Image: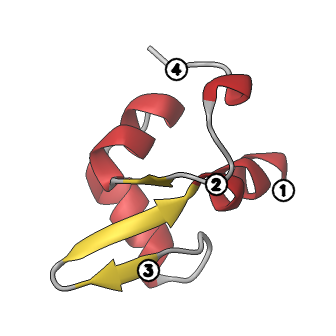
Amino acid sequence: MAISLKKIDPNKFYTIEEISNFLDLSSQTIRKFLREKRMKGKKIGRRWHILGKNVINFVKE
C-alpha cells in the first residue's frame, strides 16, 4: 500500500525497502532506478540510503 508523500520527511534518509513500500514498487525496481541515476541516493558500504527530498522529486518528475 503506497502512502502519501506528505508522510515522507524530506530531511531523513530512507532504505530501499522503505522507499519500495512508500511507492508500492519492488526493491529491485528501486535499485534499478538508483543504478541508472534516475533516482538520487548514496551508497554507504553495501546499502543504499535515499534522502526523502530525492524521493519526492522523483515522484514529481
Comparing labels 1 and 2, the label whose residue is closer to the camera: 2
**Crowdedness of circle 4 by 10 Å Cα count: few (<14), some, many (20+)?**
few
Residue shown at the point (62%, 74%) measured from the top left = 38
| In the image: residue 8, left or right of residue 34 | right
Check disc 3 and report its element: helix, strand or loop: strand
Three-letter amino acid code at disc 1?
Answer: Glu
Q: Which residue is mark 2?
A: 11
Identify the mark at residue 2; answer none if there is no mark.
Answer: 4
Identify the mark at residue 33; answer none if there is no mark.
Answer: none
Instruction: Find the distance from the CA under tag 1 to the CA under tag 4.
Output: 17 Å
Residue shown at the point (51%, 83%) measured from the top left = 36
- The disc, 1 or 4, on the residue closer to the chain's N-terminal end is 4
Work out whether residue 10 or residue 56 is closer to the camera in this orientation and state it.
10
Q: Name the quarter where the N terminus is drawn.
A: top left
Comparing labels 2 and 4, the label whose residue is closer to the camera: 2
Three-letter amino acid code at disc 3?
Answer: Lys
In the figure, residue 58 lies in which quadrant?
bottom right
Identify the mark at residue 42; answer none if there is no mark.
Answer: 3
**Crowdedness of circle 2 by 10 Å Cα count: few (<14), some, many (20+)?**
few
Residue shown at the point (49%, 31%) measured from the top left = 22
Name, please, the residue furthest toward the right.
61
Three-letter amino acid code at disc 2?
Answer: Asn
Work out whether residue 12 or residue 30 is closer to the camera in this orientation and state it.
12
Instruction: Find the distance from the CA under tag 1 to the CA under tag 2.
Output: 19 Å
**Quick check: 39 above or below 15?**
below
